[in-house]
Image (cartoon, rainbow, N blue to C red):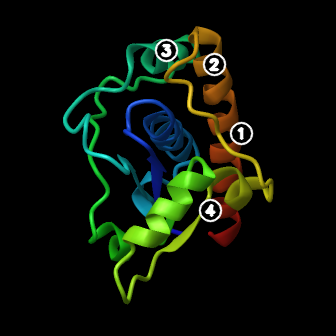
Amino acid sequence: MRSILFICLGNICRSPTAEGLMLNHVAAAGLSHLTRVDSAGIGGWHTGDPPDRRAIAAARKKGVDLTPLRARQVQKADFSNFDLIVGMDRQNVADLRRLAPAGSTARIGLCLEEAHGLAREVPDPYYEDEQAFDDVFDLCDRAVRAFVEKLRSKG
């Protein structure tokens, strides 16, 4: 895995949190030059928008800046341009498999399962309170740390 695309429904809560964390962790590990990281949404409702203010606040508390990120919708080219595409929940994964064009080379999986072997979802915090965004940050942080370890071990 040298490139990873994080996917959630609208690309304003979970997937940009994972992207921001991954960018921070690969930079800290000195792997930025070896790794391509992005995020996108299944839907395009928020295209061009920054992450949700609550996601930005949860990340800011832990020293991660999500403000430069902008939402985009997953594109057919992503299925060939990334090694690994991870959905935050099972519905994202099902949608990705449905959207994948013939001949796709990307592996599609559930984020926490790909990171830790856990068949668990990262819950959508959009309709929840700030604590839900803190919880999503922590789940994404654990997953991203596992992805970075996998990158390190492959040199």
Determine the image quadrant of residue 113. bottom right
Is any part of residue 103 visible from this angle? yes
Q: Mark 4 vs mark 1: give the one in front.
A: 1
Per the image, the residue denoted by label 1 is 142
Per the image, the residue denoted by label 4 is 151
Q: Is residue 116 above or below residue 15?
A: below
Q: Is residue 33 left or right of residue 133?
A: left
Inter-mark Cα distance, 2 to 1: 16 Å
* Position of residue 17 measured from the top left corner of the image (x, y, whole percent): 49, 33
Secondary structure, mark 2, is: helix
Badge 1: how crowded within 10 Å, few (<14), some, or many (20+)?
some
Farthest-out residue, bottom: 103
Residue located 43% across and 70% down the image: 98
Residue type for callout 4: Leu
Q: In front: 116, or 93?
A: 93
Farthest-out residue, left: 48
* Position of residue 5 measured from the top left corner of the image (x, y, whole percent): 44, 56
Secondary structure, mark 3, is: helix
Residue type for callout 2: Ala
Per the image, the residue denoted by label 3 is 60
* Position of residue 15 measured from the top left corner of the image (x, y, whole percent): 47, 41
Q: Mark 2 vs mark 1: give the one in front.
A: 2
Per the image, the residue denoted by label 2 is 132
